[in-house]
Amino acid sequence: DGGITQSPKYLFRKEGQNVTLSCEQNLNHDAMYWYRQDPGQGLRLIYYSQIVNDFQKGDIAEGYSVSREKKESFPLTVTSAQKNPTAFYLCASNHFTEGTGQGNTEAFFGQGTRLTVV
Amino acid sequence: SQQGEEDPQALSIQEGENATMNCSYKTSINNLQWYRQNSGRGLVHLILIRSNEREKHSGRLRVTLDTSKKSSSLLITASRAADTASYFCATGLTFGIGTKLQVIP
């Protein structure tokens, strides 16, 4: 089955630690995205990537880092510089059409990773 | 980035009633999308409406788009308890804060 998979589902981090959230897709999508969702809030864009080895900051990139070494994978690292990392993290992917903007085709989402600082 | 804002933020209706959610945005768009999120899960795409379309249907869903008012509405007809979820509109890469719909059996 084609889809987008996030792991782990739940993650606990100690103060001062870096943690990496996994996102893998087998949909042959060009573009991948990371969003953060806080309780009762909408989604805020952290980073996105349109092509392998290239990525751009979203609205709240500080304290996060990403890589895009393979088309299928877009891991997100939450660094110790992120002061309030407890949140629900969502990864998404879609086809990217040049000239029409990144968000202009249906996006597929993973089931999310809930990160808690302990 | 473009901003979608849903209204109302919460809606509670009886099963069988219709539910209407509204979305406003600030800049010009190529299209607008609606998504659904069950509690603690990822988002699922419901429908995409292009800027040159005024209305689109998919099953019990009806979406309208008024580009002159920069607004869209999502109507769910004959609601079911299983429709209980949060609904988000999205323009470009930006999502609104969502409408939390509760359908009471």
Image: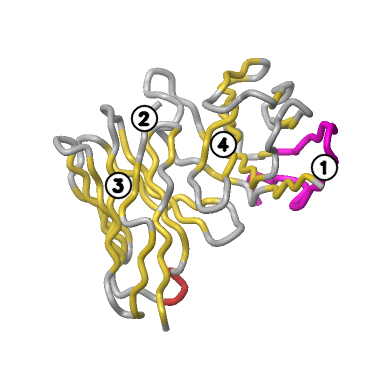
Tag 4: Cα neighbours inside 10 Å, few (<14), some, or many (≥20)?
Answer: many
Q: Residue at image x 65%, y 19%?
A: A52
Name the residue located 42 percent from the left edge and 84 percent from the top edge: B105
The reply to whether the magenta stretch includes residue A28 is: no
- Which residue matches tag 2? B2
Q: CA distance from mark 4 to mark 2?
A: 19 Å
Q: Nearer the viewer, mark 1 or mark 2?
A: 1
The chain letter under disc 1 is: A
Which subunit holds the residue at mark 2? B
Q: Position of residue A1 (x, y in %)?
A: 66, 52
Q: Quadrant of residue B78?
A: bottom left
How far apart, in angstroms, are the residues tagged by discs 1 and 2?
33 Å
Left or right position of B105 against B32? right
Tags 1 and 4 both on a single chain:
yes
Residue identifier under label 4: A93
Whether residue B65 is situated above or below residue A82 in the rendered picture:
below
Q: Check residue A4 for magenta coloring.
A: yes
- Amino acid type at image mark 4: Ser
Q: Secondary structure at mark 1?
A: strand
CA separation in Å, label 3 and label 2: 12 Å
Q: Which residue is mark 1?
A: A13
Give the distance between the C-alpha atoms of the residues marked 3 and 1, in whole angstroms: 36 Å
Please give the range of residues in magenta.
A1-23
Residue B70 position, x and y percent, is 22, 37
- Outermost residue to the bottom: B105
Instruction: Determine whether A98 is above or below A112 in the image.
Output: above
Q: Chain of mark 3?
A: B
Residue type (three-letter) at the residue carrying disc 1: Arg
Graded by Cα atoms within 10 Å as few (under 14), some (14 to 19) or many (20 or more), the crowding at tag 3 reads many
